[in-house]
Amino acid sequence: MSAIVSPSTGPNLLDIANLMSAMTERCVVQLGHELFVGAPRFESHPPFMYSLTSQHGVGGKMPGQFAGVTGASDSFAMGVHTGTHMDSLSHVAFNECLCDGTNVMQPGVQSPRDGIRMLHSEAIKPIVARGLLLDFPGFAGKSRLTAEYGISPDDVSRCAEHEGISIRAGDVVLMRTGWDTLWPDPAAYTRMPMPGPTADTARLLAGLGIIATGSDTLAYEQAPGEQPLEVHAELISKAGIFILESLDLRELARRRAYEFVFVVLPLRISGATGSPVNPIALLAPERP
């Protein structure tokens, strides 16, 4: 169901209310892994750090505080490319240029304090779009792809055909390798090599006009691959396509939910090369 919009009345609130009332908790699938101290990461990215800075029943109370009420608060710090995250379009340059033509070596473009300033486009933004899951282990009848596996354009075509879906312009394509099952074991999850799409597959996706893609591995692309970061360059630097990494795609695969509404809301961190995220897939309400 789509909202009806007119210049005078705006969104049809009745349609929206009916849609929301049909949604249940079972229709919302979280695609971000739970963060914990010691969560998997590449060594070049800062770890997830957490502290319960104020505990219930510890410390004084505010004057006039309501009787029986206690409070607690906490803090965390992490790298923007730690955990489930979204790469911004300033994350990777090719021949010193970002996808909007910004030369990263130009004075004032990047600095330790202000990050990277793209001159002609947004580096990162929210996405609400048609999402597709390509579950390669499910298609192959395996729990995981082999570590050295490179996902080819033919793999993409055959898996999509098997699932009864087609990739269209404006889509978000999520690729499952089975690496999401290794998240609780940081040593196994971060061990090289890792399966993922090849550069030819990146060019295929760019040619189809997708706006974002992601996978359940740390690297997204086949890693280390013949030319490390070539896939990132093809997607981010050349085509302006966002990449999401370390997704948890197990529940979508279990449900065989290959088509859904994909929603991701990155943090608005000025000048950042990415953002931690917890994307969601909205599934069609189940029929009684």
Image: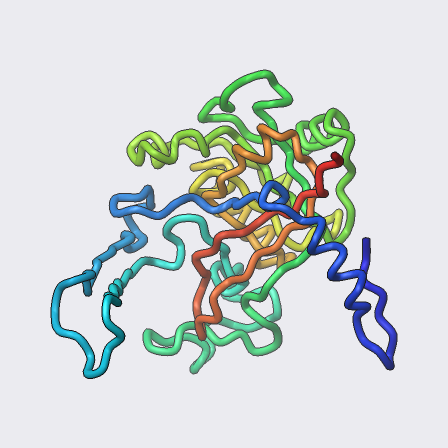
Q: Where's residue 39, x and y in %?
A: 31, 44
- Residue 13's spot in the image, x, y percent? 77, 68
Specify whether 26 is left or right of 116: right
Identified at 17% across, 75% down, the residue is 61
Identify the residue at the far top of this view. Answer: 141
Colouring: rainbow
Q: Residue furthest front?
A: 67
The residue under the point 36% across, 76% down is 111
Q: Is residue 154 left or right of residue 147?
A: right
Which residue is nearer to you in this view: 207 or 246?
246
Q: Is residue 205 visible?
A: no
Return the x and y of residue 136 as percentages of the image width and height.
60, 27
The answer to whether 176 appears left or right of 161 in the picture is left
Front residue of 217 and 238: 217
Placement of the C terminus among the 4 image quadrants: top right
Q: Is residue 46 above or below residue 13?
A: above
The mark total stands at 0
| Residue 207: % across, % down | 74, 48
Residue 30 appears in the picture as rendered: yes
Residue found at the very far left of the displayed protein: 59
**Residue at 79% in and 70% down:** 11
- Work out whether 210 lies above or below 100: above
